[in-house]
Structure formats: structure tokens, C-alpha cells
């Protein structure tokens, strides 16, 4: 059988060599297709390879009667409708590792250029100015590099910085002291990295939790004269706060490859002589473009021949009879994982997932992956999915346990998720109620009955008269409306919890106010 592959964006010729070598693949190169022409051509193809130019919309996917796989030669898949692909049984693959080296090298180039003021000095020469005294730099040797986010690229940067004889300290939600020691780097909290570093580089995905993570408050914690590098994602650094920190001489320099809005024109940061910048060139090397095309080409061939991909982005199709049974539990499983992810900031070491009742009779592996996805998504964002969740958990040193039990504890079906970290275990259980949908029925050892959605606040408190009233009064004072409230306790007058569903997300200062109330131990915002 011969498979037809459409390449609709320019790709490295060396990168698509695996496709040309495959005896059962026919390649068609047609770039710059209009939407109408793409819709006309796509029904003939088994696979589609793109970069960022082609928009693979729901309309395109639904028109592609024979399409089995979409390959994205790169990391981001914003131009591909993943939901439509999954619904139509089309596997989407990308190349998350192909540009790691290029991005790390670009970060080090920016770091060195920033330290030695190379771009500014070159510009002065172009203006016929020989200003040696003005462009005195600093050595990297002996300086401390703080890395926020220690994924593939952050780890590569750490290795290179050690080669420059820098001291490296890193923060990552999945980094432990043991892992840091094995890498030969320092382990720190987010605040400790900010306080100790002479240079700070960020390598996190852009999520709700990481947007403007380097802000006015963060700059206030840093050393005077700190220098900042961002070759990750625009929006991780608050650009207004960075501008003010440079003007106020708190920050001595910044090297930026990415911006919140791209392309940029007349950006105020570029008016500052302390700032150097490039137009999002982190992955723009001949080798990276070749590598991402090679990686995705291999995956496309493997999938067309019925194998398993190395870098899938969405869940592959499962037998219809299996999906029909487990599909109602997908929403619940992800929400339980997401709930636990928001209960604390400690590194999770183990995940236990217990299936009871009807669930114990089903094929639950997809549900396990979905639960792990919900847990990891807080820190990894859309990079994690039901296909790669287990792999990413393993890479983060998290052990996954799956267990079926006959003990239903009064429920027709029960899904319980438990996490273990150094300080102990946290647990949440949920079920599906006929006609009512998903419910959280237990948090740790307290019984509950809460719909797992919306803005929630989990409060640990002492079971005393007036505690609930004080919480309600404070929220009312802050113009926060309570939709529902559940209270759980094990004994009168002992420790208890209350779960509130509210109409808007609480700010940190509002959580702090709650925790200052009498008989309130701790308050956690859980936004699902």
C-alpha cells in the first residue's frame, strides 16, 4: 500500500529525507495553498505535514476523509485544531526535542552578549565611535545563574553554564534537592533563585501560573544589578515592570528573544541602551529546522504503518466499545487530578489511582493518563496530554500506581486519586451520580458533595461556632459571592474543612485575609 503525504509548508529537504526513502510513501509538495485549495486537495491524503503557516482547522480535518496523521515540524500546535483531530481519529505529532540545542545555544549567546555588551559595542563602532571604557563588561566565571524552569532547554542551559564555570541554582515545580544534586547544580525555591542570582534566565511554558511570574514584586527580591534573559515565551516577564526596573537601575541589563506581542514595532524596551534583543530566533538554525522535520517525518511513517509515535500531541483512537464505556469518566478524572495539583506546591513523588465499583470492570488506562494529565497540566500547560502524560510524569520522577478494588464505600463507581510528597499524602475521590454528573465526594478523610468546576476555596479550620460566619462576612466585604458551601468534619469541635464555590477567582491578598481569621488554619484557591 502507498500512503500519500501532503507537505503544505516549506520544510528542510534533508528533514524530509526519511519520507523520500520510504518505499510506501508518495510525497506531494504544495506550499502556500489557499484555504479553498487545501480543502479541495486534502481528501486525497493520508498524512499532512505543516509548520506554522498552514491553518489546519476543523473544516480541513473534517474534509480529510483519509487523513490519519498531522505532523507539525516544530513544537507549537496552535495552528492545528486538536479537538477536531481527536474527534476524527487523527493523530497529531510534533517535534519537541528538535530545537532544544538551538534554543539553549541561543540563550547562552544572549547571556554572553549581555555580560560583555557586544551588540552595544558593535553598534558604537558602526557609528564610528571607539568607546572602550563605556562597554566594560563582566565575566561569567564565578557568577550565579538562576534558572526558572528546568525542562529540556533549562537543563541544557545549566550544563553549558557550568562549562563557563558559573554557579547554577534552579527552580522548577518538579525539581527536588536530590535531582539538583545529581545534576551538579543548586536547588532553590522561586524566591531563593531570585535573591541569589546575578543572571536570571526563564525557561517555563506560558501558563496562567507563569504569566508575569517575573513582575514588580519579583524584581524587588533580586540583587541590585541583576541581568535578565528570556528566550522562552513572551509574557513570562512583565515588560512594563522590566522597563521600570531598568530605568530605576535595579536591573543592569536584559536580553530578550521573545515579546508579549509579536512582531514588535517601536517597543519602549528597545529604547533602553541596557536591552539587547533578537526577533524570536531561538529555534532558527539550519540544524533545528532539519531536526524537527526529521523527527516528525519518522513519526508520520511509523503511524502510517500502524506503529506508535514518539511525540504524539493528542490521544490516539481507542476501540469504540472501550471508549463508549469510559468516556463519561474523562471529565471527572481530569478534574480530580487538577484539584490535587492545586492543593500544594510540593514536588509530587507518587500518584495512586484507585478504581472501584463499575470502574473496576473497565479498561481504565486512558482514564489513568487523563488523571495524570490533569495533575501535570498546572505546570506543563497544553504540552501535556492524555498520550504523553505518563511519559512526562516518568521524566519528572513521578511513579504512577493503578489499582482496582471491590470496595465501593456505598457508591456505584468511585475514582480516588492520591498523591505522595515529602510532607505526606493528599487525596480526593469522585463519582458520577445518575442525572447529576461528576461530584467530588471526599477530600482527604472529609466527606463532601461538590461539583468539580469553577472557582473554589478549600478552607481548613477548627469546628467552632462563628468560623463559617467570619468567612462569609469577609468574602462579602470583598464583594465575593458564594454560590455553594459544603462543610466536612470527623468530630464535633475538631478539625474540619469547608469547600466554597464562588463567583470569581480570589486574589492572594484575599486568601491571606482568610487565613488571618480566628479558627482558620489555611485557605487554598482551587480554580477548575
Image (spheres, rainbow, N blue to C red):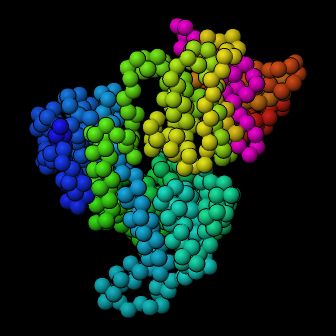
Q: Residue 268 is drawn in which quadrant?
A: bottom left
The image shows residue 3 at horizontal and vertical percentages of 18, 40
Q: Residue 42 is drawn in which quadrant?
A: top left
Q: Is residue 429 left or right of residue 119?
A: right
The image shows residue 265 at horizontal and vertical percentages of 31, 60
Q: Residue at x 86, y 19 (%)?
A: 491
Residue 229, placed above or below residue 490: below
Q: Can you say which quadrant of the picture contains the N terminus?
A: top left
> Number of labelled discs?
0
Residue 291, placed above or below residue 499: below
Residue 480, placed above or below residue 70: above
Residues in magenta, as a range? 421-449
Is residue 168 something one can see in this rendering? yes
56 or 130: nearer the eye? 56
Residue at the outermost right position: 493
The image shows residue 247 at horizontal and vertical percentages of 51, 68
The reply to whether the magenta stretch includes residue 392 is no
Is residue 83 something one can see in this rendering? no
Q: Residue at x 31, y 44 (%)?
A: 302
Residue at the outermost top position: 435
Residue 446, placed above or below residue 512: above
Q: Is residue 294 left or right of residue 432?
A: left
Q: Residue 231 is drawn in which quadrant?
A: bottom left
The image shows residue 52 at horizontal and vertical percentages of 27, 49
166 or 303: nearer the eye? 303
Q: Residue at x 45, y 80 (%)?
A: 117
Q: Residue at x 34, y 40 (%)?
A: 307
Q: Can you say which quadrant of the picture contains the C terminus?
A: top right
178 or 300: nearer the eye? 300
The reply to whether the magenta stretch includes residue 427 is yes
What main secondary structure does the magenta stretch of the protein show?
A: strand
172 or 476: nearer the eye? 172
Amino acid at each position: 500500500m502507498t500512503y500519500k503525504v501532503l507537505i503544505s509548508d516549506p520544510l528542510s529537504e534533508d528533514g524530509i529525507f526519511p519520507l523520500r526513502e520510504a518505499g510506501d510513501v508518495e510525497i506531494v509538495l504544495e506550499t502556500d495553498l489557499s484555504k479553498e485549495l487545501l480543502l479541495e486537495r486534502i481528501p486525497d491524503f493520508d498524512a499532512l505535514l505543516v509548520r506554522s503557516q498552514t491553518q489546519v482547522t476543523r473544516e480541513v480535518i473534517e474534509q480529510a476523509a483519509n487523513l490519519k496523521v498531522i505532523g507539525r515540524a516544530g513544537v507549537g500546535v496552535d495552528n492545528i485544531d486538536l479537538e477536531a483531530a481527536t474527534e476524527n481519529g487523527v493523530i497529531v505529532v510534533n517535534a519537541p526535542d528538535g530545537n532544544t540545542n538551538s534554543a539553549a545555544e541561543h540563550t547562552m549567546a544572549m547571556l554572553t552578549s549581555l555580560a560583555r555588551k557586544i551588540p552595544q559595542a558593535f553598534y558604537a563602532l558602526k557609528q564610528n565611535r571607539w568607546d572602550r571604557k563605556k562597554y566594560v563588561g563582566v565575566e561569567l566565571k564565578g557568577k550565579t545563574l538562576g534558572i526558572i524552569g528546568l525542562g529540556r532547554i533549562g537543563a541544557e542551559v545549566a550544563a553549558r553554564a557550568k562549562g563557563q564555570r558559573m554557579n547554577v541554582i534552579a527552580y522548577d515545580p518538579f525539581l527536588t534537592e536530590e535531582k539538583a544534586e545529581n545534576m551538579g547544580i543548586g536547588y532553590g525555591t522561586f524566591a531563593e533563585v531570585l535573591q541569589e542570582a546575578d543572571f536570571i534566565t526563564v525557561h517555563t511554558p506560558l501558563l496562567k501560573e507563569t504569566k508575569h511570574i517575573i513582575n514588580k514584586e519579583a524584581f524587588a527580591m533580586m540583587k541590585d544589578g541583576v541581568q535578565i534573559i528570556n528566550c522562552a515565551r513572551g509574557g513570562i516577564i512583565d515588560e512594563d515592570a522590566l522597563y521600570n526596573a531598568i530605568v530605576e537601575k535595579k536591573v543592569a541589563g536584559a536580553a530578550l528573544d521573545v515579546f508579549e506581542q509579536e512582531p514588535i514595532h517601536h517597543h519602549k524596551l528597545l529604547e533602553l541602551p541596557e536591552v539587547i534583543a533578537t526577533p524570536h530566533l531561538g529555534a532558527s538554525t539550519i540544524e533545528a529546522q532539519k531536526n524537527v522535520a526529521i523527527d516528525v517525518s519518522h513519526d508520520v511513517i511509523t503511524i502510517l504503518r500502524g506503529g506508535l509515535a514518539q511525540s504524539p500531541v493528542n490521544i490516539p483512537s481507542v476501540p469504540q466499545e472501550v471508549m463508549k464505556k469510559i468516556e463519561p469518566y474523562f471529565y471527572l478524572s481530569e478534574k480530580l487530578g487538577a484539584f490535587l495539583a492545586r492543593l500544594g506546591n510540593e514536588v509530587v513523588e507518587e500518584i495512586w489511582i484507585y478504581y472501584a465499583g463499575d470502574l473496576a470492570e473497565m479498561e481504565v488506562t486512558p482514564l489513568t493518563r487523563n488523571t495524570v494529565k490533569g495533575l501535570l497540566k498546572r505546570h506543563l500547560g497544553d504540552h501535556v496530554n492524555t498520550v504523553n502524560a505518563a511519559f512526562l510524569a516518568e521524566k519528572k520522577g513521578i511513579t504512577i500506581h493503578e489499582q482496582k478494588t471491590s470496595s465501593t464505600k456505598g457508591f456505584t463507581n468511585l475514582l480516588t486519586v492520591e498523591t505522595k510528597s515529602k510532607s505526606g499524602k493528599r487525596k480526593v475521590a469522585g463519582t458520577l451520580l445518575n442525572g447529576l454528573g461528576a461530584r467530588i465526594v471526599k477530600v482527604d478523610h472529609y466527606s463532601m458533595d461538590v461539583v468539580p468546576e469553577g472557582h473554589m476555596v478549600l478552607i481548613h479550620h477548627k469546628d467552632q461556632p462563628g468560623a463559617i460566619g467570619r468567612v462569609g462576612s469577609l468574602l462579602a466585604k470583598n464583594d465575593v459571592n458564594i454560590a455553594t458551601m459544603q462543610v466536612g468534619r470527623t468530630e464535633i469541635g475538631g478539625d474540619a474543612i469547608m469547600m466554597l464555590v464562588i463567583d470569581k477567582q480570589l486574589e492572594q491578598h484575599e486568601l491571606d485575609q482568610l487565613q488571618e481569621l480566628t479558627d482558620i488554619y489555611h485557605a487554598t484557591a482551587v480554580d477548575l
